[in-house]
Image: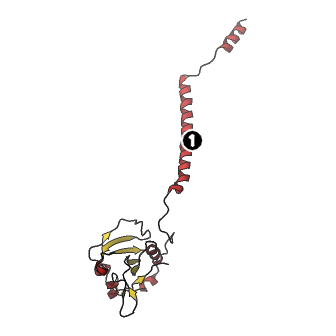
Amino acid sequence: MDTLQDASTSANSVQVPNPRAQLRLLLLGVAVAGTVVVALVAAVVMLALPIFQKPPERGAARLASPVPPDREFAYINPVSQWPSDWTAAVCHSLPYEVRMPYARLPNATATAVCRARIRPNGDVVNVTIARFPAELPMQIDLLNDGYKWYAFAYDHGQMMAFATYSEVTVTDPKTNLGESPVLQPLKQFGFNVYSGPGP
């Protein structure tokens, strides 16, 4: 009879787990649920980011990896003097160095802006001075940003470009071709002045 009583007592008694064990199980459940929620939120954010990003305003052409310049670039548009002389010829004020990377010329390795020495029709015009790893990224950036006139030369392993938005044109008496009066002073060093950049 004692065994029956012991069996009935053990059947009627409910074992209560240790409160510490309950707390551990609760914390484990919360941690797992929290991790799942964080992972789901992160996945939703990562998938939604491209939808909410503003597309580039300009982008006629993009360049994934610029082509490194060849030694042949040293003989294209050979010029005389030094970059400081070139800058002084077209800039009325000292150039203001732009913080890099510069969103408007993403392929440039250095960029500066100055007020032009020549003021066509009395207007104040800026000249952008930028360095590029090669001609193709230079052409792409100048085209995408809407420059009207530019001149460039090979200097210390990079292309150095001078560009302006000014649409004013004068006729070169030697060639009878139109060119920018803003960049015309560069011709004394052997620069060619071009219109309409692009690859």
Name of the residue lying farthest toward the top: 1
Left or right of 4 on screen, residue 152: left
Note whether 162 is above or below 177 in the view shown: above
- Colour treatment of the image: secondary structure
Which residue occupies the foreground of this view, 101 or 10?
Answer: 101
Name of the residue lying farthest toward the left: 93
Query: Which of the 4 image quadrants contains residue 84?
Result: bottom left
* Residue 76, x across and y down, in percent: 43, 85
Note whether 3 is above or below 37 in the view shown: above
Label 1 element class: helix
- The answer to whether residue 156 is visible is no
Which residue occupies the foreground of this view, 56 or 30?
Answer: 56
Left or right of 1 on screen, residue 58: left
* Residue 86, x across and y down, in percent: 31, 81
- The answer to whether residue 22 is visible is yes
Left or right of 192 on screen, residue 21: right
Note whether 140 is above or below 49 in the view shown: below
Amino acid type at mark 1: Val
Left or right of 7 on screen, residue 152: left
* Residue 117, x across and y down, in percent: 28, 79
Residue at 34% across, 82% down = 183
Residue at 44% across, 70% down = 107
Which residue occupies the foreground of this view, 110 or 102?
Answer: 102
Crowdedness of circle 1 by 10 Å Cα count: few (<14), some, many (20+)? Answer: few
Per the image, the residue denoted by label 1 is 36
Residue at 57% across, 41% down = 36
Name of the residue lying farthest toward the front: 121
For the N terminus, give its image quadrant: top right
Q: State how many labels appear.
A: 1
Residue at 33% across, 72% down = 113
